[in-house]
Every structure is written in C-alpha cells, then in structure tokens.
C-alpha cells in the first residue's frame, strides 16, 4: 500500500492496521513529524518526508491511496501525478482517491485556503486522460453532514438578527439533528443553495 500526501498520518495509521506494508509520503515537514509521532509504533509503516511528485518507488503496489490530495493540485499536476502513479501499480492494482467534490464542474477557492473542488465527472475525465477509470463512487456521509451543518449555520446567521442567533444552542441542535437523521437529510441540500455533492 502506497499512501501519497499522508498529512498528519490519520490514514497511514488506519492503513498500517489493515495492510502488511504501508509506505506513507508527506512533503510538509510539520505534517510529516505529526505523522511520525502518530505512526511510529507500526513496524510495517515506512514514513518518508518527500515530494510525491518526485518520489521514485522501488516496488509496485496493489493499492495507491490519495487521501484528499488532488484538491490541492491544479489540473496539469493532477494529470502528471496520476500518470506517474499508474506506473507504480501492480497488474490489477487500484488507485483509491478520497476527495471532497462538488455537484458539477470545478470550484476554485483562493485566499488563505486554496483548494480546487472538482465533480466526480471532472475526476472521471481526468482519470480517463491517464488511462484510469472510475470503478466506484461513495459518499463521505460524515463530511457531507458537516457541510450541511455549516451551510445551515451560515444561512441562520444571514437571516436571524445578531442578538437572536443563539449560535451555541442552534449549533448543538443542528449537530444533534444531523447525527439523528443524517442519512435522510442527504436528499435536501439543494433548497439550501449548497454547492457540495449529494
């Protein structure tokens, strides 16, 4: 298992508990150090502070995990990375991506948090350009519900006068409602004007 763009190592730790061998790569020194602290107990995890765009593996892998990394790359870098990783796969191997998506097209955020949200269709097209195909798409329900909660609170703050907002109470009630009825609520983001994928 090859984990590219491992961040603080949450997924590297999860994968090390389930796979015989995990190579986790993170370019940011502070994130790498957090990953090393989290994953140092796993003898089957090799942790590297390296640039995923320059990494040259000595092995081939049955699975390559890209956990929320593609959204920080522009389109040409996504294509370059996907073309590179196809050469790291064993025959029949898969690339597993966990990305936040939008319903259609591409949404680029600038400022302090620069990110590119793409639709499943956009990712499918990018994968196709690299000789890959999308086999399965699954909704990240906890993240989706968090997005719904954030959108609701933004709307609440926009329509309710400041002194009446009671954000601590409304926030707790929103959280409780989403936890209790989460699966059924996934069908209702459109009336709230959300851009996230349902």
Image (cartoon, grey):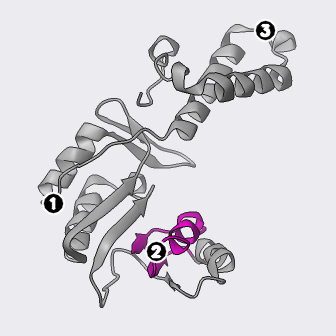
Q: Is residue 155 above or below residue 105?
A: above
Residue at the (20%, 54%) spot, across then down? 127
Quadrant placement of the N terminus: bottom left
Q: Residue at x 52, y 34 (%)?
A: 144
- Could you tell which of marks 2 and 1 lies nearer the N-terminus? 2
Nearer to us in this view, 18 or 96: 18
Residue 72: which quarter of the image? bottom left
SS for callout 1: loop
Q: Quadrant of residue 73?
A: bottom left
Distance in Å between CA atoms under marks 3 and 1: 51 Å
* Circle 2 residue: 19
x and y percentages locating residue 183 in the rendered image:
53, 26
Q: Secondary structure at mark 3?
A: loop
**Numbered badge on residue 161:** 3
Residue at 19% across / 76% down in the picture?
87
Q: How many marks?
A: 3
Residue 85 appears in which quarter of the rendering? bottom left
């Amino acid at each position: 298992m090859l984990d590219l763009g491992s961040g603080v190592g949450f997924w590297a730790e999860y994968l090390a508990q389930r796979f015989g061998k995990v190579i986790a790569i993170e370019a940011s020194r502070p994130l790498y150090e957090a990953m090393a602290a989290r994953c140092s107990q796993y003898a089957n995890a090799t942790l590297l502070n390296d640039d995923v765009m320059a990494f040259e593996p000595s092995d081939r892998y049955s699975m390559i995990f890209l956990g929320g990394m593609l959204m920080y790359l522009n389109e040409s870098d996504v294509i370059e990375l996907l073309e590179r990783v196809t050469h790291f796969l064993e025959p029949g191997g898969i690339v597993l991506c966990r990305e936040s998506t939008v319903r259609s097209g591409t949404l680029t955020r600038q400022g302090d948090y620069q990110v590119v949200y793409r639709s499943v269709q956009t990712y499918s097209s990018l994968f196709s350009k690299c000789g890959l195909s999308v086999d399965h798409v699954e909704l990240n329900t906890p993240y989706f519900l968090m997005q719904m909660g954030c959108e609701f609170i933004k709307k609440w703050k926009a329509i309710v006068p400041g002194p009446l907002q009671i954000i601590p109470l409304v926030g707790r009630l929103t959280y409780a409602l989403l936890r209790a009825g989460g699966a059924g609520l996934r069908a209702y983001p459109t009336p709230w004007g959300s851009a996230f994928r349902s």
